[in-house]
Image: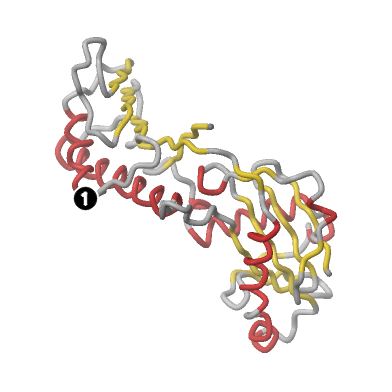
Amino acid sequence: MRRVVIPTIKSMAQSEHAKGRERWHLKIFKECYPKISDMEIISSENPDFILNGKSRSIGVEHRRLVKPTDNDGFDLKQEEQTQEKAVNLACEIFYKTTGKYVEVIISFVNRTKINAKNLAPEIANIVKNNIPEKGSHKLIRKYDADFNKFLPDDLDLIFISNPIKLKGNYWSFSGAGFVSKLEPELVQEAITEKNQKLPNYRREHPECIEYWLIIVIHGFRPSSWFSIPDNFDKIQFDYDFDKVFLLDVQKGRYINLKRK
């Protein structure tokens, strides 16, 4: 099991917003795939992007892979979004009541379903009452050595830092989960979903000489951690796009998926 710190307030780059994140993924792909390095990225909707070059245009559709809801009905991606909402709300409440800037990392209990609206004020209040001296930090665990409880059930720990110079609130949260082996069926499901939209893309942008689909393993969050088996480049998939690529963002590499 790995634990990763997930940025939220202000420390989150624009690339973490939906369209910006997709553009960021495409830029990473361009760095890996030199044949399109000189082409301009133009945002679109049907498909997600158009790559414009001197003599050709390519339509590019983006599809991010996430772990599906498990057998117990637990949706990891949805819970990450709820945790992010709780941290953002807590940061807003903290700043409105104190006017101060601090750095905070919040660790949630693994596989817990939280209520962001109810939990955020509790988090804000805990941070407010435990701001360390300038230039120092403080770690608050759920229990002390005598098993006195200091945090709500949904939290493992809160780390608070109060740097000498800080221009904003930097709040983040950590998540834990297992790195799953990528199954071909999950990739094929994503391809099949996008195949249905391809005829519309061709009508909308007849200037594109090719249409590509980029399946993205984002990483960085437990819901999108996958390990790619060594033989994945040998597996054949059913697709209507001219090319389909599997992009591993964290490792900065891609696989050109084979067609059946």
Residue furthest bottom as drawn:
203
Q: Is residue 72 left or right of residue 195?
A: left
Question: x and y percent of residue 107 in the render?
Answer: 37, 32
Horizontal side, residue 188 vs residue 224: left or right: right
> Considering only vertical position in the picture, is 4 above or below 208?
above
Where is mark 1, residue-wise? Answer: 117
Q: Name the quadrant containing residue 122.
A: top left
The residue lying toward the viewer, choosing from 254 and 101, is 254
Residue 23 screen position, x and y as percent: 60, 59
Most foreground residue, 120 or 70: 70
Where does residue 253 sit, x and y in percent of width and height? 75, 47
- Above or below residue 235? Residue 179 is above
Q: Going 58% across and 44% down the picture, which residue do you hit? A: 225
Q: Kindly identify the residue that appears in the image at 66 percent across and 58 percent down.
A: 26
Residue that protrudes farthest toward the top in the picture: 145
Q: How far across and how far down the image is residue 139, in percent?
A: 31, 19
Instruction: Please determine whether, in this image, residue 234 is positioned above or below residue 9.
Output: below
Q: How many marks?
A: 1
* Residue at 22% over, 39% down: 95
Q: Which residue does the image show at 80% across and 79% down from the upper left?
A: 209
Way the structure is coloured: secondary structure
Q: Is residue 97 left or right of residue 43?
A: left
Q: Quadrant of residue 39?
A: bottom right
Residue density around tag 1, few if under 14, some if 14–19, many if 20 or more, within 10 Å: few
SS for dot 1:
helix
- The residue type indicated by label 1 comes to Lys
Which quarter of the image is occupied by the C terminus? Answer: bottom right
